Image: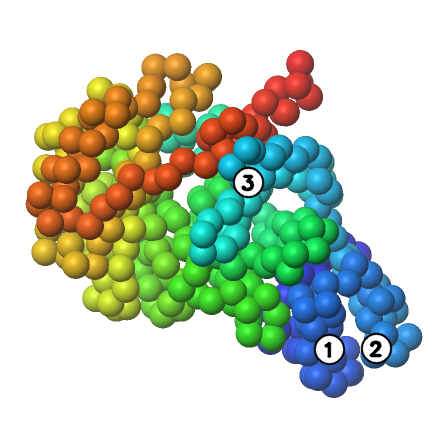
Amino acid sequence: MQKQSIYGLTMDKLANWFVEQGHKKFRATQVWDWLYRKRVTSFEEMSNLNKETVSLLEEHFVFGSLKEHIRQESKDGTVKFLFQLSDGNLIETVLMTHKYGFSVCVTTQVGCNIGCSFCASGLLKKNRDLTSGEIVEQIINVQFFLDERKKEERVSHIVVMGIGEPFDNFDNTVDFLDIIKDHKGLAIGARHITVSTSGLAHKIKEFADLKSQVNLAVSLHAPNNELRSKIMKINKAFPIEKLMDSVNYYLDKTNRRVTYEYILIKDVNDHKEEALQLAELIGDKRHLSYVNLIPYNPVDEHGQYQRSEPEAIQEFFQTLKKKGINCGVRLEQGTDIDAACGQLRSKQEKKRVG
């Protein structure tokens, strides 16, 4: 029997599992408290459970399936973890320090099939989806790292923007969100969580129907179909018209702001013309829109792409502002380590092969 991660069950699923095993629902609350509040590392430490319950849990679940493979720490406090999964695959997770707390960027897939031509995450094609437990365990392992510093620090914000397309692993991502939001567990507020998608239009609508209060970010990176199709092959399946239709559905359904991620690449998408097109694309929904301008992190394998010049970034920003678009240039973190998402994993996989 393949054991699953104990971290992969929502509170309701764990409670239902106990009932199916002939036990009381309240056992789920007890286990939840040990997992996420006391943060024990074995079932034997759950001292208010009888031996029968402990044995049952040990028979069906594993406690931790991730092992820290490499850890890189930046001068600015950013920490990049390369975790090894039970099947030997590698994934990246990043801890970032902000004035408002600690944010973790999690991965949802081993590799990525979206195929953005500028992105390090897609250098290695998708191997498989992560389970909900493997996604949750990234948060738990980072929290263990913070616990070791004995400063009563906690993960307070989550961004689902690591390797992979979260909405291509929709069900596991939604379970992950339910687990980390649960007030009896990690209790990370929905409004402190952001999920990023490259533009799976039908899943954006499905996400809107959940009315979960979790923030949505759309990786746009180009304001017209011709350019976006060149750098993001997903645009051929979900062109901008279909994407923006789904975004408008989300806005109408939730009345919550959408963030547009826009990586600025030198002489590709960083001209004033593109800024004007972007402002027009957002149109009358600008009061519920925010554009996050991101200076490009060069990737060796994508040598044709370079970071936009500071002057071009500033002109792009000012053009949007003059058109009434809420926007900002993202503060860079971790530039002295493998900054681009997927770089560290890609380098390690090459070492394995080479």
Q: Quadrant of the image for the N terminus?
A: bottom right
Q: What element carries label 3?
A: loop
Instruction: Name the residue carrying label 1.
Output: 30
Q: Residue at the location (33% across, 64% down)?
A: 208
| Residue 294 quadrant | top left
Residue 327 is left or right of residue 195, and the answer is: left
Residue underneath mark 2: 49
Element type where label 1 sits in the image: helix
The kind of residue on which mark 3 rests is: Gly
Which residue does the image show at 34% across and 50% down from the upper left? 217
| Residue 327 visible, this orientation | yes
Looking at the picture, tell me which residue is in the foreground, 53 or 306: 306
Residue 199 position, x and y percent, is 32, 46
Residue found at the very far right of the displayed protein: 51
117 to the left or right of 186: left
Mark 2: amino acid: Leu
Q: In which quarter of the image is residue 41?
A: bottom right
**For mark 2, does the 10 Å Cα neighbourhood hold few (<14), some (14 to 19), or many (20 or more) residues?**
some
Give the mark, 3 or 1, whose residue is nearer the N terminus: 1
Which residue was labeled with disc 3?
Answer: 77
Residue at the (34%, 15%) spot, across then down: 304
Left/right placement of residue 175 relative to residue 44 reads: left
| Upstream in sequence: badge 3 or badge 2 | 2
Nearer the viewer's eye, disc 3 or disc 1? 3
Residue at 45% x, 45% y: name it. Answer: 161
Return the x and y of residue 244 as percentages of the image width and height.
Answer: 21, 50
Any part of residue 172 in sight: no
Please report contact status of discs 2 and 1: CB closer than 8 Å, yes or no: yes
